[in-house]
Amino acid sequence: MTDGPVNPEPPTPPDGQDGPQIGRDEWVARVEGRREGYHGIMRPIREAWDRLPRAGKLTALIIPAAIFPLITAEGNVFRYGLFTMVYALLALGLNMVVGFAGLLDLGYVAFFGFGAYTYAILASPHYNLHWQAEAALPVVVVVCALVGFLVGLPSRRLIGDYLAIMTLFFGQAFVLFVNNANRIKFPFVGYTDLTGGSNGLPNVDPLNFFGYKLGDTRQQYYLLLIAIVLVIVMLYMIRDSRTGRAWRALREDPLAAEAMSMPVNRLRLLAFSSGAAVAGFTGAIYVTIATAALPGDYDVGLLILIYAIMILGGFGSITGIVFGAIVVTSVPELLRSTANARPIFYGVILIALVMTIRPWKRLAAVLGGLIAFGFVVHAIASAWYPRLVEGKAQGSGWFADFLNHWMLFPTHVTTMAQVLYIFMVAAIVIVPQLPRLWRTILLVPLLYLVIFVWENLMIEQITGATKLILLGAMLVALMIARPQGLAGEAYVEIV
């Protein structure tokens, strides 16, 4: 017999980290190392935000939003405020379906349009029905929830890509229907114009609650703000309820949720109905703002915009969705002015570098390398091919002078900039997937390429399709670098 213990403890790994050990699962041993923590300059801000109670977070969102119409012109309230509220409300509804329950719904915008058309039928001269808002809105919510229930029925058998294809078909079928439903034959009624066809349903009545009309832009804004607050409170309550926990279990692993005796089919139908009800309610308010229900307002472009908000804010996050709506809605409007475009562009790049690159020495090396790289490229181009530097930067001042001695400005730049634009989009998608060393090496020329395309092409065409393509590429890069979005929760996965 030996003098040692019968079951000796396995030795600790040399690096002091939890590693594979006898009787312990390797993934479980390293689970804490996989959890993302806060670091860098944003750490105190994020930790302070997390320490706030939910009432404090909601107050921090409400106060600036409530003050906004009081300090700006009515036109800005319409351009920035109303559409931000509408998109945020839509994204919060979609968050229940995709963020909470994990159901990929690509026909969500159809519920938005269904609510708009239903309200337009009930409160417009089309059928001479002028229902009050307190009667029409509940009907819209119930009808849209019922339609969501019917659309969700196939989700009992379809998951993943198949569910996405089915819901996408529903969304496209809705657009096709409202474009051609201006001559439908109903039993005992005959032919009737249901949706107005491609002309839509015009002259929708403003919201009228018990005789009080909300026709003013600021009144509509505050109504949307109240609706967002109510939906956020409802989402907080749902997330902590048994239904919310069951939805998250369904999102993570449907088979495991079903094995734990959760009513998976019922949960899916409830998610579809709840999301459709919020979308229909939003559509009813929107159609009173637009004063018409038009088929072109409910197409795939809006769906992409809502998903961009969710990707930016983080699936499952509530406050992150509101932040994403503000960014996605406000930044394109601000970029319409060249005077605003350049500070926003370089400010976003600098903030992104400060937030993502660690340690500080690496950040300093990247910024210093970028400046040196630009001067070297400019000097080589001046000596070997002067046509690359014969152009001038837009604007005046010290920054424009710096760009003239640092960035390439060819005389005939259009074709060259368009070709490099394609390379830039591909590089934004590919570089974040490379190992860290190669990411650091290629980051400097990539940043220089991005600035070249911006200064020579996009600063003049910031309202064109190039802006949308660049936004899509940046969202793909964000999903690769931070799949949970800016404010979403980091999940521990087996890789």
Image (cartoon, grey):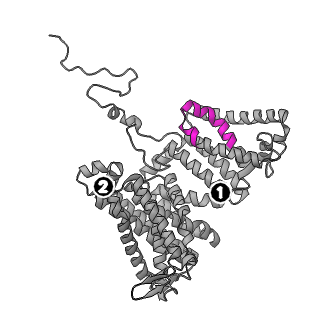
Q: Position of residue 337 (x, y in %)?
A: 71, 60
- Residue 465's disc number: 1
Q: Residue at x 38, y 66 (%)?
A: 151
Instruction: From this view, report whether residue 301 is shown above or below residue 140.
Output: above
Indicate which label's residue lies in the foreground, 2 or 1. Answer: 1
Instruction: From this view, report whether residue 379 is shown above or below residue 83.
Output: above
**Residue type (three-letter) at the residue carrying disc 1:** Ala
Instruction: From this view, report whether residue 23 is shown above or below residue 483.
Output: above
324 magenta-colored: no
202 left or right of 408 in image: left
Which residue position is annotated with label 2? 246
Pick the residue in front: 216 or 198. Answer: 198
441 left or right of 18 in image: right
In the rendered image, is residue 226 in sight?
A: no
* Segment colored magenta: 429-449
- Label 2 neighbour load within 10 Å: few <14, some 14-19, many 20+: many
Q: Residue at x 55, y 64 (%)?
A: 84
Instruction: From this view, report whether residue 371 is shown above or below residue 206.
Output: above
Q: Position of residue 251 (x, y in %)?
A: 36, 52
